[in-house]
Amino acid sequence: MNPEAAAPDAPSLGTNERSVEVPWAHQRVGGARRVLDVGCSTSDYLSELAREEPRRGRRVYGLDPDAPQPIRNVGVVKGTVVAPPFPTASFELILCISTVEHIGLPIYGQHEFPHGDILAMRHVRRLLAPGGRLLLTVPFGRAQVNPWFRVYDRRGLRRLTGGFRTLSAAFYRLRQDGDGSYEPCRAADLRGAGYDFEHMRTEGVALAELAPSGPLSFLLARAFTRLSLWFDRLRGKEKPFLPPS
């Protein structure tokens, strides 16, 4: 299976998890003046963010590895968060909306490297200014690795967010009536959730507002992550998931 061929075109807003992710993130931007969106190629909401809070002088930037198109009033940069073209502590708020699950997989012009999602989160942490926040959304349910994205379970999400503390969190599931909308739920309700390949949308999504934890917590989380990944390799649990043919 060619992973490049497997990557879908982005569905329009309202047909997938963006219908809950974007409003959720927008409500939590607050008065942040320096904002970065990681993976901005389909971020239609950035122009609106840039127009808000004009008196505060808000500056909005977008970062994407795949030759992103210009966005009005947004500083769009081609690059990757694992080698960010910004100084440490540059941003009060970082948006990572359905992005980190792709990082490190051979898609969207990236080089393939193991655990790119976890490495990306460490760089995101460095880019946050003191008191800064990260708005993160990811597919959530039954853990799996697809040629172009990952789905996280409780353990995987905890590992991904090591070094951060949770300010707020929410979970949504795809409604069973087939109208393509999502409803709030508990994390436990998504235990078996997978991915709707027919419509290119996740069956469950986790949304987390995060802030960097203290240095000791970060070091402990980093050590735990390394140990956890080592055990996964030892037990052969790092196996790719492919959709049924």
Image: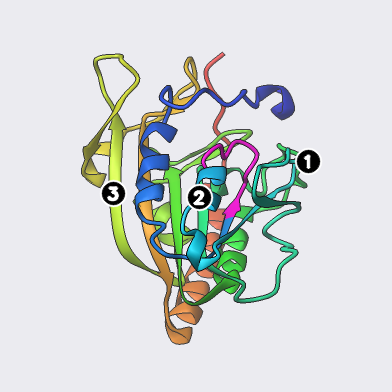
- Magenta-drawn segment: 37-45
In the rendered structure, which amino acid carries the disc numbered 1? Answer: Ala
Disc number for residue 49: 2
Query: What is the secondary structure assignment of the residue under circle 3?
Result: strand
Q: Residues within 10 Å of mark 3 (few under 14, many from 20)?
A: some
Question: Residue 221: image x %, image y %?
Answer: 46, 73
Q: Which residue is drawn at 46% across and 65% down?
A: 32
The label nearer to you, 2 versus 1, is 2
Q: Is residue 81 above or below residue 188?
A: below
Q: Name the residue under label 3.
A: 170
* Most foreground residue, 82 or 160: 82
Where is mark 1, residue-wise?
67
Q: Is residue 41 in the magenta section?
A: yes
Q: Which of marks 3 and 2 is in front?
A: 2
**Mark 1 crowd level (few <14, some 14–19, many ≥20, 10 Å Cα):** some
x%, y% of residue 241? 54, 32
